[in-house]
Amino acid sequence: MSVVVEVVRSGFVESTHQARMLTVDAEGRLIETRGAVHVPASPRSSLKPLQALGMLRAGLELEDELLALACASHSGEPFHVDGVMKILAGAGLEETALRCPEDHPFDRTVTERSRVHMNCSGKHAAMLATCVANGWPTETYLEPGHPLQRTIRETVEELTGERIAATGVDGCGAPLHYVSMLGVVKAFRAYALSSPDSYERKIFDAMRTHPEWTSGTGRPEATLMRALPGLMVKAGAEAFDAFVFEDGRAGTVKVEDGSQRARVAVTVAALRSLGFDAPGLAELGAPAVLGGGRPVGELRVRLR
């Protein structure tokens, strides 16, 4: 069985996208399993909450919106940039310490290009702060053998319950760990089902309370979290999404060709398979296809 996203224009299907989907109920029982959910995948930034957990365990001290920013693929809006600079300043560092590449922000109203505007700069600033807290080298914090990255690797394997299948390099330069979608779901459930005083709960609460800090104003991930209080969702590059609700319902999706336009539609379908609904969810799940500036079609998700 598979998931197909159809791009319908003026009554004709002009493009299709294949996707994988995995959802589980509050007890962890499988609800939807479509595609190769047991083979290694590339979660990309969907693993940021796990990276942040490793950092907290290693002594990182961040709270509230700055902790959410450490888990973010942010839009580079002014408040994101200010937050990154606060994390760096708290560690006695400047922007030059960042080893992520320079990039333009997702926020189209900002034209500046820099390392701090790069969408992963919150994570990188938190990584540097963790290094300073432990007296670890800051120049080499992205190397897989660095104490920080070894700690993160151990955390990923613990929460997913899997040995990492392979390690590559993410777009921001940090190590990228390949695990199954099933492992990602298991890891995300650990956040919702953790004790109130745990680091997992601290991250879970920070991301849900400050959704704009984990992505950006108007971004679909923030919109979903505002529409469904109790939901934590984290997007990754190449059209990967992972989410968990406070009662343990969880899921992941992966669009095979990496199409971002199909990602949110499949995520909404996954949420609906678990009984979720809210105002605005229909529009996110079936965004309009425009012709001449007006709607002439939609994205349509089919479960086959």
Image (tube, grey):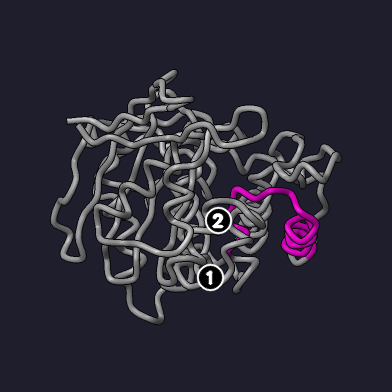
- Residue beneath disc 2: 71
Front-most of residues 202 and 268:
268
How many C-alpha atoms fall within 10 Å of the one at disc 1: few (<14), some, or many (≥20)?
many
- The picture quadrant where one finds residue 35 is top left
Segment tinted magenta in the rendering: 68-89
Residue at (16% x, 65% y) in the render: 27
In this rendering, would 1 be left or right of 194? left
Q: Quadrant of the C terminus?
A: top left
N-terminal of the pair, mark 2 or mark 1, is 2
Q: Amino acid at mark 1?
A: Ala
Front-most of residues 122 and 4:
4
Image coords of residue 205 (percent x, y): 48, 73
Residue at (43% x, 27% y) in the render: 8
Image coords of residue 279 (percent x, y): 45, 63
Circles 2 and 1: CB atoms closer than 8 Å: yes
- The picture quadrant where one finds residue 3 is top left
136 is higher (above) or lower (below) than 287: below
In this rendering, would 159 be left or right of 96? left
- Residue beneath disc 1: 206
Instruction: Tell me, yes or no, whether the highlighted magenta stretch contains residue 80.
Output: yes
Front-most of residues 86 and 252:
252
Q: Amino acid at mark 2?
A: Cys
